[in-house]
Image: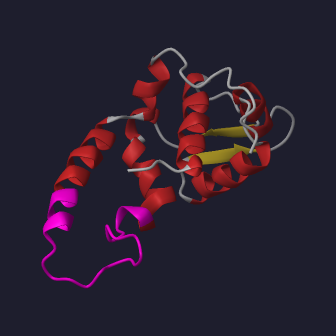
């Protein structure tokens, strides 16, 4: 499974918010610290807001905060937001469903996906936030 940039940025942003507890953070602050595109991260946060994982606070000292307990936000939930189509795609990658009732390779892939998805369901934003930052100090990741 290939993790999309949007999924990666969403996890990075959510981890930042989890580490700051309920202190609002501006997208630009997170982007600058991580060396990633603020414009792209802003689009990611719009989607996270639509899905009620973050909420915005307006005014001086405003920004984004988590809308849910970070222990209740799984990496799988983020994957479903940004990669739902890829998660259901036929393995031949040419179409969503190849239409074959019996595909031996697809059965193997489905078993592998289940293992991966079960793993991601157990990985919460809070768990990741507890670990030393593996994302910080990125250089030249602004595209």
* Residue for point 61% across, 29% down: 16
* Residue for point 59% across, 50% down: 6
Residue 47 against residue 57 in the figure, above or below: below
The magenta span reads 86-110
The foreground one among 115 and 63 is: 115
Q: Position of residue 138 (x, y in %)?
A: 68, 25
The foreground one among 29 and 62 is: 29
Residue 105 within the magenta-colored segment of the rendering: yes
Q: Position of residue 67 (x, y in %)?
A: 55, 44
Residue 41 within the magenta-colored segment of the rendering: no
Residue 143 against residue 122 in the figure, above or below: below
The foreground one among 56 and 73 is: 73
Q: Position of residue 36 (x, y in %)?
A: 72, 37
Residue 116 position by quadrant: top left
Name of the residue lying farthest toward the right? 60
Q: Position of residue 71 (x, y in %)?
A: 39, 33
Name of the residue lying farthest toward the top? 132
Residue 31 position by quadrant: top right
Residue 18 against residue 113 in the figure, above or below: above
The foreground one among 112 and 6 is: 112
Q: Main secondary structure of the magenta part?
A: loop
The quarter of the image holding the C terminus is: top right
Residue 13 position by quadrant: top right
Residue 9 against residue 109 in the figure, above or below: above
* Residue for point 27% across, 39% down: 119
């Amino acid at each position: 499974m290939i993790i999309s940039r949007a999924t990666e940025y969403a996890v990075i942003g959510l981890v930042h918010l989890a580490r700051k507890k309920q202190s609002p953070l501006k997208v630009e602050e997170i982007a600058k610290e991580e060396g990633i595109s603020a414009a792209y991260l802003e689009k990611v946060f719009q989607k996270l807001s639509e899905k009620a994982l973050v909420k915005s606070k307006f005014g001086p000292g405003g920004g984004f905060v988590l809308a849910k307990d970070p222990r209740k936000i799984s990496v799988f939930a983020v994957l479903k937001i940004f990669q739902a189509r890829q998660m259901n795609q036929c393995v031949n990658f040419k179409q969503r469903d190849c239409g074959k009732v019996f595909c031996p390779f697809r059965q193997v892939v489905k078993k592998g996906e289940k293992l991966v998805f079960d793993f991601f369901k157990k990985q919460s934003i809070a768990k990741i936030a507890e670990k030393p930052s593996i994302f910080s100090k990125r250089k030249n990741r602004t595209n």
